Image: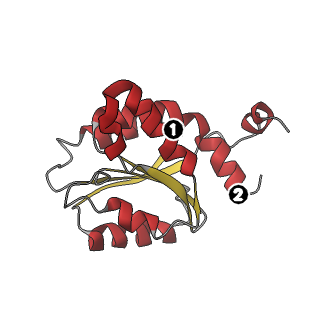
Amino acid sequence: MSVSEHKSKAQKSISCFVVTVSDTRDEATDRSGQLIKTLLEEGSHRLAGYRIVKDEPSQIEALLQETFAREDVEAIILNGGTGIAPRDGTYEVVSRHLEKRLDGFGEIFRFLSFQDIGSAAIMSRALAGTAKGKLVFSLPGSKGAVDLAMRRLVLPELGHMVSQLKGR
């Protein structure tokens, strides 16, 4: 079956949980989390939940465990904490849960970012994979990076990936 045939049979609406990892943002200032929610809604996907957590490994871990246990969550989209600053810990927490890594996601994201921001793209530790039967995306926290990742990579393949993950 061709990629277009797979996509045509893919699930159309995915239930997603959005997580913003930040020491400084709240709902009023979380432009990246709000953008993810808006883009999901525009793509006819469902919001299963939204939360902001501090860039503390224990808080990220607890929220991941909570979302992994939820049957209504098919994909988890995190933003923030993917850089190399001392407080950036999202990558470490997410990566230890991934059962299957989608290495191409991070590679292509950094390539596309390089076209926009140049060599600073090498500092991104954006990643994606599967864990506990769910898709997991970990995006940088900047609004521009979120916009790029969601529009160019996540949204075009979200239904296709969930369908593949479910063996459909």
**Residue that extends furthest to the front in the rendered view of this protein:** 119
Left or right: where does residue 159 sit relative to residue 137?
Answer: right
**Quadrant of res 63:** bottom left
Q: At which x and y percent is residue 95?
A: 45, 64
Instruction: Write the residue at 29% across / 44% down.
Output: 141
Q: Is residue 136 visible?
A: no
Q: Position of residue 162 (x, y in %)?
A: 64, 50
Real-space CA distance between mark 2 and mark 1, rounded to the nearest whole angstrom: 24 Å
Disc 2: which residue: 166
Quick one: label 2, few (<14), some, or many (20+) residues within 10 Å?
A: few
Name the residue at 32% across, 66% down: 60
Look at 37% across and 60% down and name the residue there.
91
Instruction: Describe the element under mark 2 as helix, strand or loop.
Output: loop
* Image vertical order of residue 127 relative to residue 95, above or below: above
Amino acid at pointer 1: Ile
Q: Is residue 61 above or below residue 140?
A: below
Q: Is residue 18 visible?
A: yes
Q: Which element type, helix, strand or loop, lies under badge 1?
A: helix
Q: Which residue is mark 1?
A: 108
**Residues at circles 2 and 1 in contact by the CB criterion of under 8 Å:** no
